[in-house]
Image (spheres, helix red, strand yellow):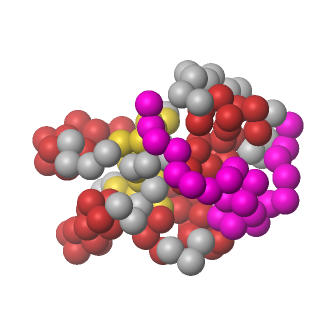
Amino acid sequence: MSTVLEFPVQETLQKFFGFDGFKGNQEKIINNILNGQDTFVIMPTGGGKSLCYQLPAILSEGTAIIVSPLIALMKNQVDAIRGFSSEEGIAHFLNSSLNKSETTQVKKDVLSGKTKLLYVAPETLTKEENVKFFSEFKISLCYR
């Protein structure tokens, strides 16, 4: 089970996402995840699924791995969270769209503990160099 950092949930919601409150069952889902309970969530498009894993990832020690097959969606999610955070390295994606120096910077940010959310493509998980890399830092949560 991951260690929860010192930020209250409501304060983190406001600070990193700019929201004053939760939609629907988000708060219950987030609390389940923070309490280490396996949680299966089905929500409609626009229902707030991303927040249900992003907020616990920020509150937990380590880096969350989010598996997504769509590069455009990864970029959208990273841009959105960076839009509210003063920490550019808080979220990254690691996929074939990055050049070598960009990949090196992502890995440096993850290893330094700066990155809380790392979006990866499914094929990224099978590359030997990435499997080794994933063993070098604490993974807080994993979502697919």
The majority secondary structure of the magenta stretch comes to loop
Reply above or below: 106 against 127: below
Residue 144 sits above or below residue 65 on the image: above
Q: In this view, does 114 lie above or below 74?
A: below
Asked if residue 83 shows in the view, the reply is: yes
Q: Which residue appears at 46% of the width and 54% of the height?
A: 117
> Residue 42 versus residue 52: which sits nearer the camera?
52
Query: Could one spot residue 121 in this view of the protein?
Result: no
User: Nearest the camera: 16 or 59?
Assistant: 59
The residue drawn where x is 69% and y is 50% is 9
- Side of 132 relative to 40 (left or right): left
Residue 4 located within the stretch drawn in magenta: yes
Read off the magenta span.
Answer: 1-24
**Identity of the residue drawn at 52% across and 45% down:** 4
In this picture, residue 136 sits left or right of residue 109? left
Query: Which quadrant: the N terminus?
Result: top left
